[in-house]
Amino acid sequence: MIDILKDILPYISGLYTLPWILVGFIVTTVIGKIFGRNKVDRVMNKIGLVLLYFFIPLLVFRIFLDLFEPGQVTFVIIVFAVISLMYIIAYYYARYIASKNKLKNSKKNLFIKTMLTNQGRSSAFVGSAMMAYWPIEAGIMIALVGIALFAVIPYILSKMHERESKKTKEEHIKVLPWFLKLYPWYLIAFVISAIALNLNTNITTADFGEIGFILKFYTVLTIPAALYYVGASIHPRDLKISEIKKLIGIDKSEEKEEHWSWVRSIFLLTVIITPLIIALIFTTLYAFSIIPIAWFAVIIINTFLPITSTNIFLHPYGIDKKSTAHSVTWTTIVCVPIVVFLITIFEIYI
């Protein structure tokens, strides 16, 4: 049995995992035709929670247990700075667009919250393909992005809504369900546990023999499962020519033109503006040999990752759900080929 799993392992790692996006899209579309798309989407939301709680933390635990080194603390600081910069870019870009489009009051706040939230990238899902090449760096990125997405950003959104509620005397929206509020600390607990074991005992999964390999196989299985989930979140109706025309601004006949204006702004922020700024900074740092190539690769690839579909979980904070759904779909379609290209180029170069 173990020998069979060892033969399978190479085919569920690295770039071999990315076709599972297409598999997830096709299978979910077919099942949706039979049972109804709304019912399938509700099931997929539950599957997303299973991945977040029972796969991603163990994957990160295994990576930090096997590969963490004290010298990576510097990279942790750099990743924290990169994530902070990305959200700062999103906030000021959102304010600029809101001012340009003369958005006021609650509409302005809705737009800013939606833009800010959708700077969150699919590091734990699409970005997990990087783990086959730069596992510890990608693991650090996944852990810190998870904390930003499920702890820092919800706190900011909550404060924004609290301030807005005082002005409008509306009922204050409470925090996320406890299981989502708990998630970032649950995730970081696995990271801390793995680092503590690594530094104090020097044990790795290899020391556990077959059980260690089964843990490795289970955690590697996370990646195609997560990418299947990404593909399942894409709706066929979003791929029509008429929808593409709305996205790029050719068709402005729809009543909800403002919706597509928001999607375009999010798309420009995540696919063009943020990657260009981050690339300019870190290409300079790499050119002067200030950071190693592995750090450079993971940071650059992360900025080109599509928007994470788990942003939908933040809908209770008042983000625009439809704009988020369309932005997730189109950044996935555009960015996944870019990510594949970048991983291939960096892997060959390194």
Image: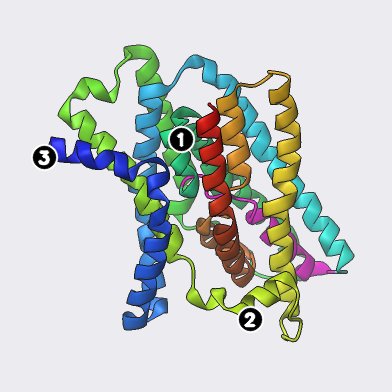
Check disc 3: other Cα within 10 Å, few if <14, some if 14-19, many if 20+: few
- Residue at 43% x, 21% y is 68
* Cβ atoms under marks 1 and 2 closer than 8 Å: no
Q: Is residue 194 above or below residue 132?
A: above
Q: Mark 1 to mark 2: distance in Å?
A: 43 Å
- Residue 1 is marked as 3
Q: Position of residue 153 (x, y in %)?
A: 62, 49
Frontmost of labels 3 and 1 is 3
Disc assigned to residue 242: 2
Mark 1: which secondary structure? helix
Sequence-wise, the earlier of marks 1 and 2 is 1
Residue at point 22% right, 31% down?
A: 213
- Start-end of magenta stretch: 103-124
Q: Helix, strand or loop at disc 2?
A: helix
* Quadrant of image for the N terminus: top left
Identify the element where label 3 is drawn.
loop
Q: Is residue 263 visible in this depiction of the protein?
A: yes
Q: Is residue 5 left or right of residue 298?
A: left
What's the mark number on residue 188? 1
Q: Amino acid at mark 1?
A: Ile
